[in-house]
Every structure is written in structure tokens, then in C-alpha cells.
Image: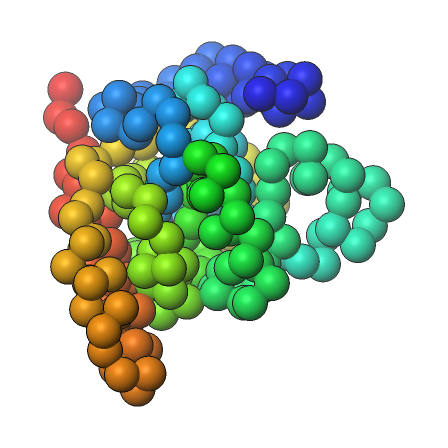
Amino acid sequence: MTPLYWWAWASSRWIFKNLFRCRVYNPERVPIAGPVIIAANHESYFDPPFIGSSLPRAINYLARENIFSHWLSGPFFKGLNAVPVDREGGGAKGLKIILDRLIKNNGIIIFPEGTRTFDGEMLPAQGGIGLTIIKSQAPVVPVRVWTYNAYNRNQTFPEPRMMSVKFGKPLNMQPLRVRAATCSRRELRGIYQEAAEVTMEAIKNLQPIED
């Protein structure tokens, strides 16, 4: 972790623990080192820092390209390991950067829905995320967050309500990757979409832990 990343990581952990009574389940399912794709549903503005601060390793994040053009926000987000991509994370430039970081044994968070939920219900998976999964050989860990009531897109300010995150077991994407290596170009789009949907289904199947 760089000094800036560590500061943001430590601050986020303190805030989520003390102000939002956060609960973190099974973070040990994320490899402590090596490449990994962390695929999560997207309920809140808090999702990237909440997921990232729940893990003991540095993680890379996807961020819209336009925030990197500002003289202040650009260097700041770069210091937090942010990757400039289009909304689906499947643009050629963004994909190249993502794959390069995975090759260098980094972890990265992606959101198969492509954007935050509007009403708390999960959105359909976007195929561009599947392309990222298939092109990489990294393990894919499904993650589900419950953060909507704390700070969703309809709220001006966050509210100190309890949040939870649950990490699932890594998915076996190898059969789809093998098919993609030998199929026709026309079939590839369907495989990308299938990879995204398989990932999204695994996220949906992660259920909250009752006290």
C-alpha cells in the first residue's frame, strides 16, 4: 500500500466500523496475494471503499474516465489505484489497463451491473464485465454488499445505518475460458454475457448471515 492508499484504507475501516457498525463475512476467501477479480453488486457510493477496506491487501478500483482529467481528482484517484474505464469496464483502453494490473498480481473490484441500483434491486449483468473475466486468468470472487440504506443514489447525505459485506468462494471460470479460446468470433459475445450472468447469479446467491 502507498501512503495515500494506506491512509484512505485505515480511515475507511475506522469510519465504517464506528459510524456504520459494519459487518464483514469471509474476507479470507479473497487470496492474500496474486491476481483476483472481486465482483460485487452495487448498492451505494460506499461500495468500493467498504469492500476494499475489508481486505488486508491493496485493491484496484474502476472509475469513470472523466474524473482523471481534473488536476486535483486525477492524481488523487491514481494514488488510490483507480483504473480509468467506461461505464461497463469493457473499453479497449480500460481493459488493457485492467489486464496489465492483473498480470502484475493485483486485485481489482468490478461491478457486473455497471452502475448503482436505483431501488435496492440488482440490475442485469453487463457483457463488458464478462469480457474482462474471460480475457483474464485470475480467480473471480463474488461479493455481496448491503449498503443501500446507508448511502444510495437517492440520498444527498449518508445515514449511519448498519452495512454488511459477504465474500463468496472463488468461481470456476475455466470452462468458459476454454470455450472462448476455440469458438468463433460471433460466439464470443454470448460467452462474455454468460460469464457476467454466472457471476451475477453467484452474487445473488450470497445470503445475509442471521444473528
Q: Is residue 116 above or below residue 181?
A: above
Image location of residue 145, percent across then percent down: 33, 38
Residue 170 position in % (x across, y down):
21, 39
Residue 82 location, quadrant: top right
| Above or below 38: residue 122 | below
- Tell me if 59 is positioned left or right of 41 in this view: right
The residue lying at 45 percent from left, 43 percent from top is 102
Quadrant for the N terminus, please. Answer: top right
Q: Residue furthest bottom?
A: 186
Quadrant the C terminus occupies: top left
Indicate left or right for 30 with 64 as reference: left
Q: Can residue 32 be seen?
A: yes
Q: Nearer the viewer, residue 105 or 142?
A: 105
Classify residue 41 as left or right of residue 45: left
Q: Residue at x 76, y 44 (%)?
A: 74
Looking at this rendering, what residue extends furthest in the right direction?
71
Question: Is residue 210 or residue 171 the one in the foreground?
Answer: 171
Task: Tell me where residue 58 appears, x and y as whole percent.
Answer: 50, 26
Q: Residue at x 54, y 58 (%)?
A: 96
Q: Position of residue 35 (x, y in %)?
A: 39, 37
Residue 92 vs 22, above or below: the answer is: below
Q: Is residue 48 visible?
A: no
Colour scheme used in the picture? Answer: rainbow
Residue under the image location 51 percent in, 13 percent down: 14
